[in-house]
Amino acid sequence: MKRSVPDLLQAADPLVMVTAYDYPGARHAEAAGVDLILVGDSLGNVVLGYDSTAPVTLADMIHHGRAVRRGAPGTFVVVDLPFGTYQTGAADAMRSAVQVIQQTGADAVKLEGATPEILEAVTVLTRNGIPVMGHVGLMPQTATAQGGLKVQGRDEEGARRTLDGALALQEAGAFSVVLEAIPARLARLITERLVVPTIGIGAGVHCRGQVLVYHDLLGLYEGDEKKLAKRYAELGRTSREALSAYAREVRAREFPGKEHSFVMKDEVLGKLY
Ligand code: KIV
C-alpha cells in the first residue's frame, strides 16, 4: 500500500528509497516494494550524460517524474526541484513545486540546502500542503562551492553546519532529511536529534532510511565504482554482453532464427512468383 507522510514519520523499520527516472525503472522499484522513489536530479548525470546536476531543468524533472508516476502508481514519489528553481525565493519555490506536483502527480518535492532563503521556501511550501524532503551534507547542485564531490562535515564547523541545517529543515516543516556523504557518527547524532526520518546516502547505517541511485545499485556503468554505493548487480556488463551477442548473430545471419520469424503458406507465396 502507498505510504503517506504520517506513515513515513512513524515507520519503525528502515525506509528504503531508490532513485528512478523512467517507466521501467519505476516499475521495477515498485515491484521490489521500496517505500519511496526519488526522481533525483542525478538524472542529469546518469540519464542525460551531463557532468553535473546544474543543467537539469524543471521541464526535465517533470518529463521524467511523469514517467515514474506512471510506472509506480502505488509508491510515494519525491521529485527533486532542480538548481535555480527554488533558491531565488519562496514564491519561485512555490511556483516550481506546484508545477511538479500538478504535472507529475508526485507526493513530495526535495530541495538541497538550509540557507535562510531555502528554509523560508520550505516553510511556505509545507504551510501550503506540499510535503518537502530536505537535503544536507554533500549537495551536488552546489558542490563546486563545497570543494567538489567530497565528504562533508568532517571538521567541527562543517559538522555543526550540517547538524544545524538538518534541525532547521525539520523546524521549517520538512518531513524527512537526506544526509549525503557525511561521517557515519555525525549522521547517527543527527538521526538521534531529529524526530523526522533521516535518509542516508554515504552516511552510515544509523540513518532511519537509505537511498541509492538506481544506476549505481544496478551497476549500469562498468567501472564506475563509488564508495557510498553498493553494486547489487552488474547490469552494465550484462547489457554490453547481450548487445554484442545480438550484433554477432545479426552479422552471422543467426538472428532472426525460425522461432522469431513468421510463416506463410506455400500456395499464397506461389501466387506471388
Ligand atoms: O539526485 C539524487 O539522486 C539525490 C540522491 C543522491 C539523494 O539527491
Image: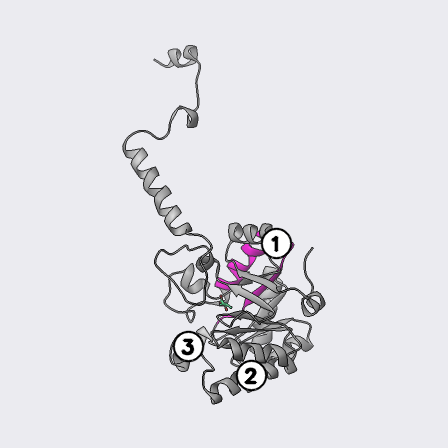
- Whichever of callouts 2 and 3 sits on the residue coming sooner in the sequence is 3
Residue 193 sits above or below residue 203 on the image: below
Q: Are marks 2 and 3 in contact (CB under 8 Å)?
A: no
Residue 221 visible to an observer of this rendering:
yes
| Residue carrying label 2 | 163
Res. 266 image quadrant: top left
Residue 123 visible to an observer of this rendering:
no
Q: What is the CA distance from the residue labelled 1 to the residue labelled 2?
A: 31 Å
Q: Secondary structure at mark 2?
A: helix
Residue sitting at x 56%, y 83%? 163
Q: In front of the other: label 2 or label 3?
A: 2
| Residue carrying label 1 | 33
Which amino acid is tagged 1? Gly
| Mark drawn on residue 143 | 3
Region of the chain picked out in magenta, as a range: 60-82
Left or right of 90: which side holds 233? left
Which amino acid is tagged 3? Ala
- Whichever of callouts 1 and 3 sits on the residue coming sooner in the sequence is 1
- Whichever of callouts 1 and 2 sits on the residue coming sooner in the sequence is 1
Which amino acid is tagged 2? Leu
Residue sitting at x 62%, y 65%? 14
